[in-house]
Amino acid sequence: MINARPAYDAKTAALRNALDNVLLDRLFLQSRSISALEIAEHILAQTARGETDVERLKASAFQVIAERRGKNAA
């Protein structure tokens, strides 16, 4: 039997998991101030710096969303 899911290294798996979680979250879906591409670039930059913890990646992305919402509300 062929394994349908390719094996990913820790950084790739963390990036994908964090990105999926953030993009499906209500906070992102209701945000009009940041794009999915910007979130993906932010998470990619964090993983490039060595971050692989999914919860920290998500928290960082949500912080960016909140900051951007705050700037647009002002």
Image (cartoon, rainbow, N blue to C red):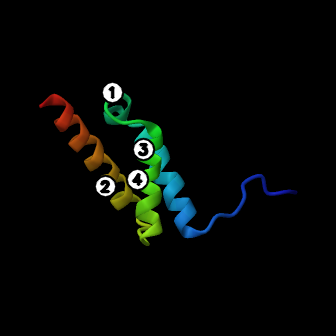
Residue at (61, 68) in percent of width and height: 9
Say which mark, if any, is on residue 47: none
Q: Cα distance, mark 3 to mark 2?
A: 13 Å
Q: Amino acid at mark 3?
A: Glu
Can you tell which of label 4 and label 2 is closer to the viewer? Answer: 4
Side (left or right) of 43 relative to 7: left
Q: Earlier in the sequence, mark 3 or mark 2?
A: 3
Q: Is residue 64 above or below residue 36?
A: below
* Sequence-earlier tag: 4 or 2: 4
> Which residue carries the number 1 mark?
30
**Mark 4 in CB contact with mark 2 (< 8 angstroms):** yes
**Amino acid of disc 2:** Ser
Q: Name the residue rendered at 72%, 58% in the picture.
A: 6
Cα gap from disc 4 to disc 3, whole angstroms: 6 Å
Numbered badge on residue 60: 2
Q: Secondary structure at mark 2?
A: helix
Instruction: Give the mark nearer the N terminus: 4 vs 1.
Output: 1
* Residue under the point 33% across and 27% down: 30
Give how far across and how far down residue 19 sits, in percent: 47, 48
Amino acid type, residue under disc 1 in the picture: Gln
For residue 38, the mark is 3
Q: Position of residue 29 (x, y in %)?
A: 38, 30
What is the total number of numbered labels drawn onto the structure image? 4
Compare marks 2 and 1 and give the one earlier in the sequence: 1
The image position of residue 45, as x and y in percent, is 43, 60
